[in-house]
Amino acid sequence: MSRLVVKDLAKSYGETRVLERVSVTAAPGEFLSLVGASGCGKSTFLKIVLGQETATAGTLTVDGRPVPPEPTTDRGIVYQRYSVFPHLTVRDNLVLVADLKHGGPLARVFGPKRRTARDEADALLERVGLRHAADLYPASLSGGMQQRLAIAQTLLGRPKILLLDEPFGALDPGIRVEMHALLLEIWAEHRMTVLMVTHDIGEAFKLGTRVLVFDKVRRDPQFPGAYGATITYDLPLDRKTRPAAPTDAGVIPGPVLQRSA
Ligand SMILES: Nc1ncnc2c1ncn2[C@@H]1O[C@H](COP(=O)(O)OP(=O)(O)O)[C@@H](O)[C@H]1O
Ligand SMILES: [Mg+2]
């Protein structure tokens, strides 16, 4: 888990301003749900936290240090449709990632490290309920199982910050509820700091300790790209110390509306 501090962050693509004056602090182990209209810059914000995009202005630090300009395993991301490697079995999808982590592809050839990677892979598969599918190929998995695999791959990096970009948006409602339970369990175990973008406001309130709303406060009808989105509401849900319990997860607490900035 890590403390994330974002100050006055802005992002433009050419003449188009996507984000402006974004400031937020996430305490270690907090679970921030990010909501907002399509196209308002939520994915862009996650990419900046990941180090895959750079901010045009402002600062972003993780545990007091600027974010390295490229992704590292301590910040892991799961997308709505994650491209797991289709030509590798479920287990080998994890072994490959573990291998890379333990010393690059050459380590694959040699004994002890390969066993370490395999053991680690199997332990994680057990954890996400995919042990029985270890020898299958991704194409034969359901959407929920593929997302479990994607989450397992990300967990291999032991991320201190877990970024989720509409991770369950493509799943059936029943599977989504299962994935919520899995995510809350993993979060309770590791207490990583989580930033999750979702279209589903119920999901945002159910899982988060805070809900951040991204929106534009200024608009120019002549030039939609003139202004960017910022965080217009920051709703604390007071779940910081509450252990994740799937039984109470369906309750949507009454938020205290606090206009931020
Ligand atoms: N690489 C890029 N180059 C140019 N424009 C981009 C790029 N990535 C995103 N955008 C634009 O930035 C805006 C925000 O996109 P995005 O962060 O994906 O929004 P959201 O995730 O909230 O739907 C959109 O208008 C999108 O077209
Ligand atoms: Mg997006």
Image (cartoon, rainbow, N blue to C red):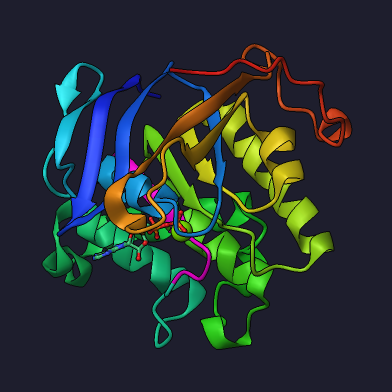
The residue lying toward the viewer, choosing from 156 and 131, is 156
Position of residue 68 relative to residue 190, above or below, is: below
Q: Residue at x 30, y 36 (%)?
A: 20
The residue lying toward the viewer, choosing from 210 and 207, is 210
Left or right side of 223 for 195: right
Q: Is residue 15 visible?
A: yes
> Is residue 259 in the magenta section?
no
Q: Residue at x 43, y 40 (%)?
A: 162
Q: Position of residue 39 (x, y in %)?
A: 45, 59
Q: Position of residue 148 (x, y in %)?
A: 59, 60
Q: Residue at x 53, y 64 (%)?
A: 80
Q: Quadrant of residue 4?
A: top left
Assign the N terminus to one quadrant of the image. Answer: top left
Q: Position of residue 176 (x, y in %)?
A: 74, 57
Q: Position of residue 127 (x, y in %)?
A: 61, 49
> Is residue 79 in the magenta section?
yes
Left or right side of 58 for 123: right
Assign the C terminus to one quadrant of the image. Answer: top left
The residue lying toward the viewer, choosing from 107 and 176, is 176
Left or right side of 30 for 178: right
Magenta span? 74-82
Q: Is residue 157 visible?
A: no
Q: How many marks?
A: 0
- Ligand 1's quadrant is bottom left
Q: Quadrant of residue 6?
A: top left
Left or right side of 30 for 16: left
The residue lying toward the viewer, choosing from 165 and 244, is 165
Position of residue 20 relative to residue 87, above or below, is: above
